[in-house]
Image: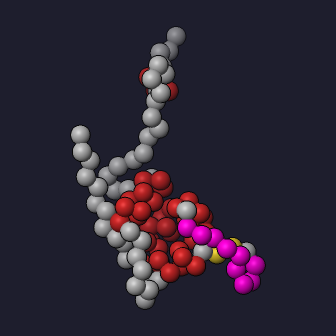
Amino acid sequence: MTIRLDMSAPSGDELKAARLKTGLSQVDAAALMGYPVQSGSRGGLQSRTWQALERSSDPRNMPGPIFAMFQLLTGTHPEFVLTKKVASGEQAENDSPTA
């Protein structure tokens, strides 16, 4: 079975809207997706990479498959959700028999 995902690259504004929808800060979103996080000039942390990806004037965009993964990890994908695989021999929590 093949699943087709829309994996177009988001604009900076679309990426920012998606992040705000999740309630994540730029630093939290960057850490989730493996982008570098560093100390800022005023203390605290920042992600210059994530800042650039959200900036509409910056020519860089987040690759579409990475954006799809962000949506899946944050539960905001419009069509799909991630679920944990059940190991063979185990029953899913919802499938367990009740006494």
Does residue 37 belong to the magenta stretch? Answer: yes
Residue range in magenta is 35-43
Q: How did the renderer colour the structure?
A: secondary structure
Q: Is residue 91 visible?
A: no
**Quadrant location, the N terminus:** top left
Give the residue displayed 37% in from the left and 61% down from the top. 65
Majority secondary structure of magenta residues: loop
Residue 45 at x, y percent in the picture:
69, 73
Give the residue displayed 35% in from the left and 49% down from the top. 80
Residue placed farthest to the bottom in the image? Answer: 57
State how many labels appear: 0
Q: Tell me if residue 25 comes above or below residue 73 in the rendering.
A: below
Residue placed farthest to the top in the image? Answer: 99
Residue 44 at x, y percent in the picture:
73, 74
Image-quadrant location for residue 64: bottom left
Q: Is residue 34 visible?
A: yes
Residue 86 at x, y percent in the picture:
46, 30
Residue 41 at x, y percent in the picture:
72, 84
Q: Tell me if residue 87 comes above or below residue 13 in the rendering.
A: above
Query: 77 left or right of 44?
Result: left
Q: Tell me if residue 4 comes above or below residue 43 in the rendering.
A: above
Give the residue displayed 32% in from the left and 52% down from the top. 79
Image-quadrant location for residue 70: bottom left
Give the residue displayed 71% in from the left and 76% down from the top. 39
